[in-house]
Amino acid sequence: MDLYDIAIIGGGPGGLFAAYYAGLRGMRVLILDSLPTLGGQLATLYPEKFIYDMPGFPKVLARDLAANMIEQAMQYEPTVRLEETVTGLCSDGEKVTLTTNKAVHHARVALITAGVGAFEPKTLDVPGVRELTGKGIEHYVNDKSVYDGKRVVVVGGGDSAIDWALNLAGNAAEVILVHRRDAFRAHEESVVACTRNPRITFKLFREVKEVHGVDRVEAVTLAHNRNLGEETIGCDAVLLFLGFSADLGPIKSWGLEISRNSVVVDEHMQTTIARVFAAGDVVWHEGKIKLIATGVGEAAIAVNFAKNTLDPKALVFPGHSSEINSPTRSVSVEI
């Protein structure tokens, strides 16, 4: 039986930093992720979006942040298994057994960093959307150069819609921002920047009634929700940023305490199952704030207490990274 020191469920920012920190502490690491690539939502949902609240970066593209975190995590050569969904987890008090859609893995401890769990983009139930999804209708942007010189309709009123309207304004010939209200759930500074950008046109109190096109999006009909009629405007793409429906999926069946659709942890990031820890957006505790910055901090806490669980003689806090093991430095060991 191949026994890892720690199995990390989820290869997003929290899982990647946990892998780095576990390697720093001399642990043998396994990363399991259901996606085909590491990086979580940073890499798959909004790689071209700027992140503004990561310490040390005034702003950083999500894909660049993901690439840096992947490089950091790979320093200690963890085993990575992609496109493996963990369907079952159980602990016998000495080890944790994880069953995936492809294999069974064993580890001395497990760390759940599954983000918001399984997520599906919210969409619109109007004519043309289902037929043209993937043909000009998208829920996220992988390559913004696709929209160079295009007329793009962005639908939504949250941070993703506002951020992408700003982000694409430098590529698209025109960005048309459609929102059903005149109030936005986005950062005020970003909304103001949108209003001042000459390439962004606001269509407020409007909702998409129909998307037109044969093989590609050609136009969209907007209905004014204050009974002021309809208008059809030509466009090349419709981007729907209406949020996501998140579900913990199989995690809910593992016997963990769940609250607010999240895994409950204590101050050590320990769950209610022995030798199973959790960190990041997947967890709930008093004072929880869902930021990448706090998630990676929780990952470090979880790894340190996991290390102490495996070796009670190991310090929970061994010192700063400059004072302990690094991939390029030899370490003497007393036997």
Image (cartoon, rainbow, N blue to C red):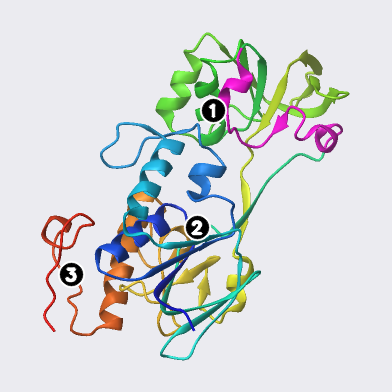
The tag earlier along the polypeptide, 3 or 2, is 2
Question: Which amino acid type is marked by label 2?
Answer: Gly
**Label 1 Cα neighbours within 10 Å, binned few <14 / some 14-19 / many ≥20:** many
**Residue with the mark numbered 3:** 317
Question: Which amino acid type is marked by label 1?
Answer: Trp
**Residue with the mark numbered 1:** 164
**Label 2 Cα neighbours within 10 Å, binned few <14 / some 14-19 / many ≥20:** many
Residue 201 location, quadrant: top right
Residue 18 on image: x %, y % = 35, 61
**Residue with the mark numbered 2:** 115
3 and 1 marks in contact (CB < 8 Å): no
* Viewer-side residue, 320 vs 284: 320
As helix, strand or loop, the secondary structure at mark 1 comes to helix
Q: Seen in the image, is 279 located left or right of residue 174?
A: left
Q: Residue at x 85, y 35 (%)?
A: 131
Q: Seen in the image, is 103 located left or right of residue 300?
A: right
Question: Which amino acid type is marked by label 3?
Answer: Phe
Q: Find the magenta span and give its range.
A: 126-148
